[in-house]
Image (cartoon, rainbow, N blue to C red):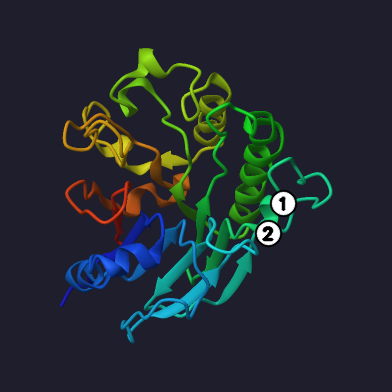
């Protein structure tokens, strides 16, 4: 009997308690049964939400500020090790006018037998771009350096809400949004550098020309109903993992958040 591919799902739930109240979280997990589920923007601490998924071990990294940011991983496979935040970052440098991003629960890394899995919720540059320079000069390069350091040991899979649409194909209205948060030249350069470092955007690798496929929609002006969206949630893999990539998909019809879940399957 052949082994089933490893199924990994990532979802910015934009408030896990809200998705649970809508009764959209546990049914989704039970239907799709991922081996590992990475969540961003949990806006909760472990224990604040009743989640009946006994087959999963829960790993949480919550922000010190209540109801803000945060990540979590639900896994059926016991990790060999777990690291929180960015151990290569200088906390003094990382202070900015919005707080301390190293205390916002933005990164969880887990080591498995054949690869590292990194779950990230990248800081938003803000509507007025007041966090853009921090992101450009500090967050993006520090995060990429951390991935490259992990990759020395074994291949890396990383996923999450990167808060950037990489190419024009990745959002519905590129011309209207050029230099808006999520589609500035600086943020897109950060995504370029990830690719230049050898990481593969799994969805775009398999579907290089697929249009009108997004992972986030504004809550205004019926944007989701009209599919005026952005693809800002990603699974990237190390180049060594490319032969193991079976599929990458976007669950655009799954409701509960302003983001939808994304998935990859790895034959590993």
* Residue plotted at (71% across, 49% down): 99
Disc 2 and disc 1 in contact, CB within 8 angstroms = yes
User: 257 or 113: which is nearer to us?
Assistant: 257
Would you call the spot at circle 2 few (<14 residues within 10 Å), some (14-19), or many (20 or more)?
some
User: 157 or 245: which is nearer to us?
Assistant: 157
Is residue 165 rendered to the left or right of residue 143? Answer: left
Place of residue 225 in the rendered image (x, y in percent of width and height, measured from the top left): 16, 37
- Residue at mark 2 to residue at mark 1: CA–CA distance: 6 Å
Place of residue 226 in the rendered image (x, y in percent of width and height, measured from the top left): 17, 31
Mark drawn on residue 100:
1
Picture quarter with the N terminus: bottom left
Mark drawn on residue 14:
none
Q: Secondary structure at mark 1?
A: loop
Would you call the spot at circle 1 few (<14 residues within 10 Å), some (14-19), or many (20 or more)?
some
Q: Is residue 113 above or below residue 156?
A: below
Residue extending farthest to the front is 221
Q: Which residue is mark 2?
A: 103
Place of residue 264 in the rendered image (x, y in percent of width and height, measured from the top left): 30, 54
Does residue 268 appear in this view?
A: no
Does residue 246 appear in this view?
A: yes
Q: Secondary structure at mark 2?
A: helix
Q: Quadrant of residue 4?
A: bottom left
Q: Is residue 98 above or below residue 246?
A: above
């Amino acid at each position: 009997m052949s082994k089933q591919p490893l199924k990994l799902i990532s979802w910015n739930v934009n408030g896990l308690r809200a998705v649970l109240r809508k009764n959209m979280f546990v049914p989704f997990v039970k239907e799709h049964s991922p081996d590992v589920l990475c969540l961003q923007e949990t806006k909760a601490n472990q224990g604040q939400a009743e989640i009946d998924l006994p087959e999963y071990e829960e790993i949480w990294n919550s922000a010190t500020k209540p109801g803000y940011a945060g990540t979590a991983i639900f896994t059926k496979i016991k990790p060999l090790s777990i690291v929180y935040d960015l151990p290569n970052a200088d906390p003094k440098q990382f202070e900015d006018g919005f707080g301390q991003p190293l205390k916002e629960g933005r990164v969880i890394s887990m080591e498995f037998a054949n690869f590292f899995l990194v779950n990230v919720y990248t800081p938003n540059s803000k509507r007025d771009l007041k966090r853009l320079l921090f992101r450009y000069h500090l967050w993006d390069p520090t995060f990429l350096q951390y991935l490259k350091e992990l990759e020395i040991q074994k291949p890396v899979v990383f996923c999450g809400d990167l808060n950037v649409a990489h190419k024009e194909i990745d959002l519905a209205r590129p011309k209207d949004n050029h230099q808006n948060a999520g589609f500035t030249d600086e943020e897109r350069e950060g995504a370029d550098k990830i690719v230049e470092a050898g990481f593969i955007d799994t969805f775009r690798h398999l579907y290089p020309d697929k249009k009108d496929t997004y992972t986030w929609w504004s809550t205004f002006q019926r944007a989701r109903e009209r599919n005026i969206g952005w693809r800002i949630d990603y699974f990237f893999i190390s180049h060594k993992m490319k032969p193991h990539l079976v599929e990458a998909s976007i669950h655009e019809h799954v409701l509960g958040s302003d983001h939808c879940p994304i998935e990859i399957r790895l034959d590993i």
